[in-house]
Amino acid sequence: MLDGLTSLMPITTLAADAAASYTGSKDALASGAGSGLMVLVPLLAILGAIASALMLCFKVRTKLPAWGVVGTIAVAFVITLVGFLNWNGDGAHIAHAFEWINASWGSGGAGETFTANFSFYMDGLSWLWMLFVTGLGALIALYASEYMAGDKGYARFFGAFGLFVFSMACLVMGDNLVLLYLGWEGVGLCSYLLIGYFYTKPEAVAAAKKAFIVNRIGDVGLALGIFLIYITFGTVEYAELFPLISDGHAVNVAGDPISGWVTWAIPCLLMLGAFGKSAQFPLYVWLPDAMEGPTPVSALIHAATMVTAGVYLIARCFPLFTLSDGSMIALQVVGYVGMVTALLAATIGMAQFDIKRIMAYSTVSQLGYMFAGLGVLTTTGAAFHVFTHAFFKATLFLACGAVMHGFAGQLDLRKLSGLWSQPGWRIVTIAMFIGCLNLAGVPFTAGYFSKDMILAEAFITPWGQLIGWVLLFTAGLTAYYTFRVFFRVFVGPAQYEPGDEHHAEDHDHSHFHPHPPGWAINAVLAILAVACLVAAATYFVKPDEGKGWVGGLLSDSSAAYVSPHGHHGDDHPDDHGAEHALRIGDAEVIPASHPGHDGEDGHSHDDDHAEKDERAMKAGTFLGMDPHKVMYYVSALFGLVGILAAAFLHGPKGPAGLFIGNRTEAAHSRADKLLPMLGPIPTWAQNKWYVDEFYNMVIRVPLLVVSHIFHLIDKTLVDGAVTVAGSLPKTLAKAIRPTQSGVLQGYAGGMAVGLVLLLFVVWIVVIRAGGVG
Amino acid sequence: MITSLAHIAEPVTTVAPDIFGDVGVSLYHYLFVSATLFALGVIGFLTRRNMIVMFLCTEMMFQAAGLALIAFSKYHLNHSGEVFVIFVLTIAAAEAALALALVVLLFRRRETLNAEDWALLRG
């Protein structure tokens, strides 16, 4: 049955295989030895957090909280690694921790139960995410142990850090959408706590609130999406949910087919949640402001792990996004939104002077790449980019953090230059260089391979031509702003000004000595730089599938999906991939038929095979060439042009500026003369295209006006009504209050009169009436 | 309760034979004395300002009630009323102890026994 389907419906060959490995039954998902241990990971993280909280209570002033959290997360990483090595790629395992929500009503049959346990669903996708969450988490905690030293909130920082890893583990490993939602809100909370870590700084508090509120908008979408999934499918557990979907057709737990508006409403709602958490246009505005938090937080949460939760959500729920009734509307939106985000954030990043903000905008831009990757049907490309980005962006952020730490908070690239020639900054510079190469997409780096995968798939997908071109252009911009930082800050003449955290006796700069990073920061940067190089090697682990190690992992998960638009005809004997490009490309042609009719459909397609094959090829090429083959060269070209532009505009004189730069001081470069030729555009980009101002005008100001109006209404109408209602009894009381004379005889007289009246009434009513009756 | 009230309102001569002995004293006479005592207590309570006298007047009202109860008890030939009076006396004793203590305390505060000087609950 499955074989027949795969030959006829190659859209979801791998998805069908993956679904087959789930076998549709929870009992088959035996808990493997390694997977069972995974319940320890969130437990360890929360233990680290609780230990830190206790140390906060007891005012521990040593580095003990850091070692607690570094230790627990490192052990969690080892457990994850051991579990992963024992996993063998044999589909999903479920590690059951404890029963959480288990309700049933009626007869308890299909659709009359609600189960959401604290269980962990370990398949390729969750293993991949857990490996870099715990691995990077441990490294960044180690970095932070030095970076945050001497801060009053040391234990508070590590408490939130541990809580973050716990939440992320719940998000990634949860075997149901409710546990995912718990983790989702948990990471949001930790993000809020850590952005607002320096709570005496008004900007940090404002940034924390902004992050929290913007994320709420997305979270509403996610919550509604989960509700709708439960109403539609009758389950929120992955192990039950995903086997219900095959070949783009879905049934609910009772076996009734699902069609209609829910097939696009569910993915659109989930997508909204992903946009909020992963900082996509138009909800990206919180991420750059989140740089107010300590740099390790920016590296871990706002670059490497948490912001990829949106990518994880869409990849995890990819079967829901590919329901054929929904025509993949949500995925197309995801693709275009990712494209817009990538371009917009890159242009803003080009014009910033704060190196940490440049990295923040580059994160937004790279997240745009990931979403574009999802939108052009390459979950592997998106996940691979998440994976490589996690390493190189953590490297870049931590290198920037080391600079900030060493130069008393200085982040302005016009006030720093030539770190390479400063004593003790070699490792930072080398790590930064490797990170920049990756981000710029220089050939044979990890970032190069993952970006190429997305770009190539974009040109193959019918709706991806525009996305592909914009992303290619953005790749050039990325290389430019990345190396702008490198050429300005790390090479060239050695000049620097300390930042405003310089609390020396006098502010005479000649007395300021930058303090180079210590062993923890250097060690972490060295490990991460090596990890960036290793991440590139994973591309060659399974070269025959052209997807690398990450692709192999994802084929063992619910994110398994093979684009029907791939040019597999070149490599495989059957050519159905190209055939289906047409079926998806022309949405009207998609037969909304039952699987039973597919046989006939397949045959009819075979008849005019050649013609359709030709059209499919036309739909998915890069200027008439196979994108898979030429993208390596094209994207490398764009990247190198960007780097050369950066060298020309910002590079120092001599070999460090590739012999085309002429910068001789920190503050000025050739760009200062050439950029004004672009007119006001650089200024607009520097002011973030006035998006914040636009939101201010369109959302915040109207809200303020409305709230002032309501305040006025509250003051006059509501408060007025309350005042009137209050004054009424007051007036009445004034009238009858004198009866309370306070004189004893008055009361006694009242009682006597009352008694007499009572007796009189009794006499009238009872005795007279009784006498008459 | 209401029926018994209807009962006493009927002419004494027809309903109440001379159960209190051959001296021409009927329930009616007892009730008359009781009512007189009660009225005196009420009037005294309302007219006097001295707290001790007012307290004595309340005692008088108590005894009026007690007398009526005993009279009814005899009239109905059971002991309910008498038992009730025992309770009333007990409570009256307790109340006397309490009330006199209060009076003493109040006197110590203001050196006066005039009830009108205490009007703190005036609205």
Image: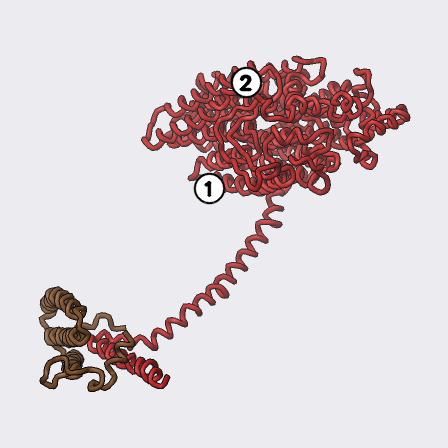
Chain colours: A red, B brown
Residue A546 coordinates in the image, percent (x, y):
71, 17
Using the image, name the chain to which the residue with label 2 belongs: A
Q: Are marks 2 and 1 on the same chain?
A: yes
SS state under label 2? loop
Q: Quadrant of the N terminus of chain A?
A: top right
Give residue A274's mark.
Answer: none
Give the residue at mark 2. Answer: A32
* Quadrant of residue B80 within the rendered picture: bottom left
- Amino acid residing under circle 2: Gly
Q: Is residue B54 left or right of residue A166?
A: left
> What residue is pinned by disc 1?
A202
Residue B43, quarter of the rendered image: bottom left
Is residue A553 among the parts visible in the rendering? yes
For image coordinates 56% across by 40% down, the residue present is A215
Q: Residue A298's x, y, as percent?
A: 52, 30
Judging depth in this view, the residue of B18 and A456 nearest the camera is: B18
Q: Is residue B49 above or below residue A76?
A: below
Assign a secondary structure to mark 1. helix
- Earlier in the chain: of badge 2 and badge 1, it is 2
Amino acid residing under circle 1: Pro
Chain for disc number 1? A
- Residue A244 position within the rendered picture, expressed as x and y whole percent measured from the top left: 67, 31
Q: Nearer the viewer, residue A37 or A165?
A: A37
